[in-house]
Amino acid sequence: MHRLFAEQLRCAISATEQVDLSKLGELVSAAYETCDRPLVTNGPVQTRDRAEEELLRTREFLDIIIENIPIAVFAKCAKSSRYILLNRAGEIYYGLPREQMLGRTAEEIFPTDVAHVVNEQDRRVVASGMPMFLEEHLLEVGVKGRDRVVNSRKMLITDGDGDPQYLVGVIEDVTERVTTRQRISHLAHHDVLTELPNRSAFNAALGERLERAQEAATSFAVLSLDLDRFKEVNDVFGHPVGDMLMRAAAGRLATEAEDAFVARIGGDEFMILMPDNTRREDVLALAERLVETIGKELEVDDYLSHVGLSVGIAFYPDDGVNAATLLANADSALYRAKREGRGRVRCFEPKMDQELRDRRLLQHDLRQAIEQNQLLAYFQPQARVDGEVIGFEALLRWNHPTRGFVPPEEFIPLAEENGVIVQIGEWILREACREAASWPRPLQVAVNLSPVQFQAGDLERSIHQILLETGLAPTRLEVEITEGVLIGDFTRALNLLRRLKALGIRIAMDDFGTGYSSLSYLQSFPFDKIKIDRGFISNLEATPQSAEIVRAVLSLAHALNIPVIAEGVETEAQRTFLAREACEEMQGYLVGPPDRIERYLDLIGVTVERRLYA
């Protein structure tokens, strides 16, 4: 009997350790029904005594099993509705000791409204003789009085004459299970950081909106949004501050677009699905309002982080009748907004689609540029302020077979986006070192390194190998970095720069003064040179502010004993200003434009040993 009951109990529990209340309830009912049957034996007294002992042991065993089942089990007298059994799990579930429940009716235990529901359920089970199973219903009495979600089963046990004898019930508290399932479902459709709907939820909402719009001939707008400069802020101030900023921005978007469907689809990108038949002017007004709202400083703890917002808009059905087209066109409009200076709103225009196609085609062609020998190394001379040429900067150029020369400001960002800049950067570094190693004069050669090269691959090994292959002395190589190299994994980048410097390579900070933390980085690493951005030099004669900035940079560099080279020097007046302020070096069209090295054969020593720029 014991082994049989134990086996049946195991059958009531699934492989996932969830209890089948139907099986468990039937098992408990059958066991108690069996135990309550009168003992019938016509054998000798000894046999009867053994049968009584076995029945007693069975009842004791059953009591132990029921007492320790981790699900609430109770039994009532079918006629009086008084509780006559409650196991340990039942005490925990109801939050009452069994002494306060046994022998009492529902009216004596629960509030009137709850007791009414319990009695009505009991009456229905007794009247019909059929079990009652309720799944995931809210029970207003539960652990310590809190409402709980439960699965419950009640069934009737009759005596030998078929008259109602007991009501047996089992109750499984599934509150945590339901809450977890709801949480998982929520996470599947919402962004964890901002609690906004995610890409999956947006795509589903867009699909439903398209179906409705097609049936009802309505129109609507899709907005593609991107936070400007968020990556810089995130990298400079750290991810915790970036997360707080993202939540603040998401909150503002949701507040301003309260009647629209706002979703975060990843990174610093958002999408907004406007209500049906919203007027075009109202859509534009909202977009402009969002740009203005996000464009204001967002206060996050003690930080004032200034970010902006760019918005691209596509309208159904004018700009697309399916999800893929609408989203692509909204993205095209967003790309135009960012390309025109960010912090703007742009609606889709047919020509934008072609621009985006051209951009993707250019990305594709860029991957083949090295294999097809389309990349060229140009060199621009660098000189002392008195005119003596001391080196060259190697500059990358792309001669596309059909487009001609593609401006670096167009293809280098594309190369960084798709990661091909690592391969291209290695190519220009090898070409620069190979060329410089062949010069009769031991001039410096400077090469720009992209932040992407620091993040991907083994840059130190690559540079070391190139120096060995080309035979260029490490002391003749100068690598130029922007502060973007140090943003992000600062420690890793700093360690790599120190290892490069240990090889004898010179390190220059390019575009000094244009970023967030150029000054602080001077404290962290002993740069060999500072390059003043051409933007300050070009405005020397036009704005007093530029002149003051250049003076300040030179004063700081002199105090730190760091040489300075000014980029973009094009006029004698600019050279005179730099000489007066004790700037050591210069680079620009006044010295010489970027060109193939063949133009400067005399400067590298092929024809003469030394030459002034003039």
Image: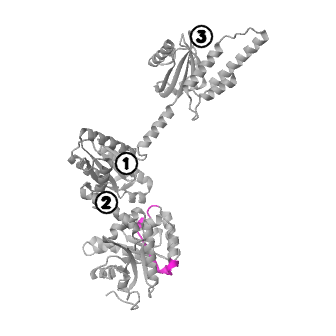
**First in residue order: circle 1 vs circle 2:** 1
Q: Residue furthest bottom?
A: 608
Q: Position of residue 553 (x, y in %)?
A: 37, 73
Q: Secondary structure at mark 1?
A: strand
Q: Residue at x 70, y 10 (%)?
A: 40
Answer above or below: position of 93 versus 477: above
Left or right placement of residue 488 versus residue 513 in this view: right
Crowding at label 2, few (<14), some or many (≥20) Cα neighbours within 10 Å? few
Whether residue 325 is visible to the viewer of this picture, yes or no, is yes
**First in residue order: circle 3 vs circle 2:** 3
Q: Image quadrant of residue 397?
A: bottom left
Q: Which residue is mark 1?
A: 264
Q: Which residue is mark 3?
A: 159
Q: Residue at x 29, y 48 (%)?
A: 222
Q: Image quadrant of residue 575?
A: bottom left
Q: Image quadrant of residue 256?
A: top left
Q: CA distance from mark 1 to mark 3?
A: 64 Å
Q: Secondary structure at mark 3?
A: loop
User: Residue 8: which numbered mark, if any?
Assistant: none
Answer above or below: position of 275 versus 161: below
Which of pointers 1 and 2 indicates the residue nearer the eye?
A: 2
**Range of residues picked out in magenta:** 467-488
Q: Position of residue 160 (x, y in %)?
A: 61, 9
The one nearer the camera, 481 or 200, is 200
Q: Which residue is mark 2?
A: 357
* Quadrant in which the C terminus is drawn: bottom left
> In the image, what residue type sits under mark 2?
Arg
Question: Is residue 504 one of those drawn in magenta?
Answer: no
